[in-house]
Structure formats: C-alpha cells, structure tokens
Amino acid sequence: MSRHRAWKVVAFLFFLAGLLPRAFAAEPVLVGIDAEFGLQNSTSAQAVELGVRLAAAEINAAGGVLGRPLEIVTKDHRSIAARGIKNIEEFAADKRVVAVFGGRFSPVIIEQLPLLRQSGLPFLAVWSAADAIVDNGSMPNYVFRLSLRDSLAMPFMLRAAADRGLDKVGLLLTNTSWGRSNFAAAEKYGASSGRPAIVGAAWYNWQDASLVDRYRKLVDQGAKAIVLVANDDEAALLVREVAQLPAARRVPIISHWGITGGRFVAAAGPALGQVDVSVVQTFSFFKARPAPLKRFMETARRVAGIQRIEDIESPVGVAHAYDMTHLLAKAIGLAGGTERAAVRAALERLPPHDGLVRRYAPAFTAQRHEALDARELLLARYREDGVLVPAAR
C-alpha cells in the first residue's frame, strides 16, 4: 500500500472514530404506548399514537430531547387487563423506555397500578377517566393525567341535563371500575345538589345483547334523560334500540366520552338521527386557539397527510397525547437525562407550556397530577356527516 493511500485509510478510520460518540449520543429515547390497538372498531389507541407521533415529529425536528430523537414503541392490550400487565412488565424491564402512555380503558389501567408503583415507570394517562387512576395512594405517585376524570365528568353531565330543564335523570352504567367510579361521583354530587334528581341506576355487563330493558326501567321511574357511561359498541346498540321505541319514549342521552373512542356513528347507523345524543368532551378542534391549531395542522399535513380537522378521529385522544408528549419532552430536558425518577420529579415542576388544549401554567405540581379541570369541559354532538362538533348550548 502506498504511503498516500495509507494516510487516507488512517484518516478515514479517525473519521469513523469521531462519529462514534455522536452516534452514541443520538441513541433514541423510547416512549411506550400501551393501549387497545387490536380491539375491533376502536380508534382510541390509534388517536393516542397519532398525537404522540405528531408531537415527536416536532420535537425531533427541533433537535430532539438532550440531542436524542424520540421513538415510539407500541404494545396492544386489546382491552384485556392481563395483557396490559404483561405489557407494563416488558416496558419496565427495558430501561430505554422513559415513560408509557395509556389508552382508553380505566379498568385495565387500575389493574396495572400495583406494577407501575413497583417499577417506578412514569405513566401518562391521556384518555382514561376513573378517579382511582391518579388517586391511587402511591407516594411518590408515578401517574400523571392529561384527560377527563369522572368526578368532573359526572357533575358536568348532570348539570347539562338540569340546564335543559330535564329535572329527573337515570344513570345507565357499565358494571366495571369505570362505571363504579361514575356512580360514586353521581352519589357525591346528588348529596350536595338536588338538581337534577337521580331516579335510579341500571347496570349492564360487557357484551350484553340488549340494553333497552334497563333504559325502559329508568324511563318508567320518571327519567327525562339518561346519563350514559358506555363505550362506542354498547352505546351504538342502545341508540339502535331506542330509535325503535315510540317517539314519546325516546328521552335525551347525555353520554360519557367512551363513545368517541370507536366507530360509534357507523355502528349506530341511521338510528343516530332519531335519538338526541350528546357527549362530554375536554377539547374540540373547532374551538382551538388559532396559533396552536395552525402549528398542529401543519405537522399533521406533513407527517400524517391529514388535511382537515374533520378527518381527525377520536379528537380528544389526539390532542391530549400531543400536549402530553411535549410536556414529557420538557420534563426530560429539565431532568437532564432519562432516569425515570428524575423525569417523574421534573413533571411536577415544569415551566408553563402553551399547548393545543390549553396553556399549562404549570401542567402538574407535587400535589396535583391532573392537567385539566372543569373549565375545559363542553358538550358535543355528531353532525349528519358523523363529525363531532361542539353542541349549541
């Protein structure tokens, strides 16, 4: 080998050696998502993933976190608690995973809480609403929520009925920890307010073939509205059954937001046009502030090909996950690393952040792991084209 060529080889080797520290420094920061990806007709997990993906694209374009890119790892629990527990075990064992986002189903997350407490893995709840998810008794608490909670949702739905002059309501609830969380919230509200009167509660089980008898019982007890705690499939079944009743027996249904986590409109079909259905939400793209919305939509068009806000399915899941990802990135920067306990502590002392859903000032504190409050709540309805829009009050 000639001396000239030998120097070229040596120079090239030094060049490669110089790249190694930079390659190591650019090792991705992994963010997990554990949700109901494989559940038939569900869109909630996909919405959470979209929100995380869009925020990560913005963060990475700006240099990542600590000079490292964010990468997403997804696991599917199919709404089954045992799968969810296994997924958390796997995420916890992978020290590259700095935090995990959760999906729609509160009962799954409640079963995961002991393992989350044991593993010290920050868990970011961006859809699930059961109070016990955050009010879990852990010190320190590794769960942070940017979502609705039942003790806000249920009073809001009851007041919405009263505001419409519907002074007697019935509760139709899923027989799960989520349903029981809402029942407790309703009892607490009812003890302090006589408006509207709660005439009774009826419970149903997952995969029940019919809900109309429970609905009829509540109407027979004098209910002028039904406050429904259900997911998309059960709600669609109820709407189809109510649409077959005489018009005088069709009372308004005010629903928790589980119905927006799947293809409720398609499953309900034409019956939805014959039943008065409204649903609680924390956010609507139709009411978003112009500057954050413009920034979000520019990313959505570039990364996901989304051209209009009407094309966004399960909108609260997208918006919540988007904001929470930006908050997580700020926490990693504040912590100066990805050690989980340090990131957890940093989430409690974040600077203000101007998000899509709201301005967080701050999002969390050591005493408050809830980013949203009653000021964000609104009612929404499905338009004839199936798009969820703010309801006229």
Image: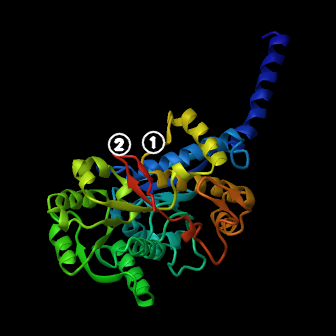
Q: Position of residue 353 (x, y in %)?
A: 70, 58
Residue at (26% x, 53% y) in the render: 272
Q: Give the distance between the C-alpha atoms of the residues marked 2 and 1, in whole angstroms.
A: 10 Å
Task: Give the label, 2 or 1, closer to the camera.
Answer: 2
Question: What is the secondary structure assignment of the residue under circle 2?
Answer: loop
**Mark 1 is on which residue type?**
Glu
- Which residue is located at x 43 percent, y 47 percent? 46
Looking at the image, residue 253 lies above or below residue 293 = below
Mark 1 and mark 2 in contact (Cβ < 8 Å)?
yes
Residue 73 screen position, x and y as percent: 50, 48
Task: Classify residue 151 as left or right of residue 276.
Answer: right
- In the image, what residue type sits under mark 2? Asp
**Residue 96: in sight, yes or no?**
no
Residue 68 visible from this viewpoint: yes
- Looking at the rendering, which quadrant does residue 130 occupy? bottom left
Q: Which residue is mark 1?
A: 310
Residue 181 shown left or right of residue 18 in the figure: left
The residue under label 2 is 385
Mark 1 secondary-structure assignment: helix
Give the class, few, some or many, for how many residues have Cα within 10 Å of label 1's Cα (few <14, many ≥20): some
- The relative height of residue 92 versus residue 19 in the rendered view (above or below) is below
The quarter holding residue 104 reads bottom left
Nearest the eye: 12 or 30: 30
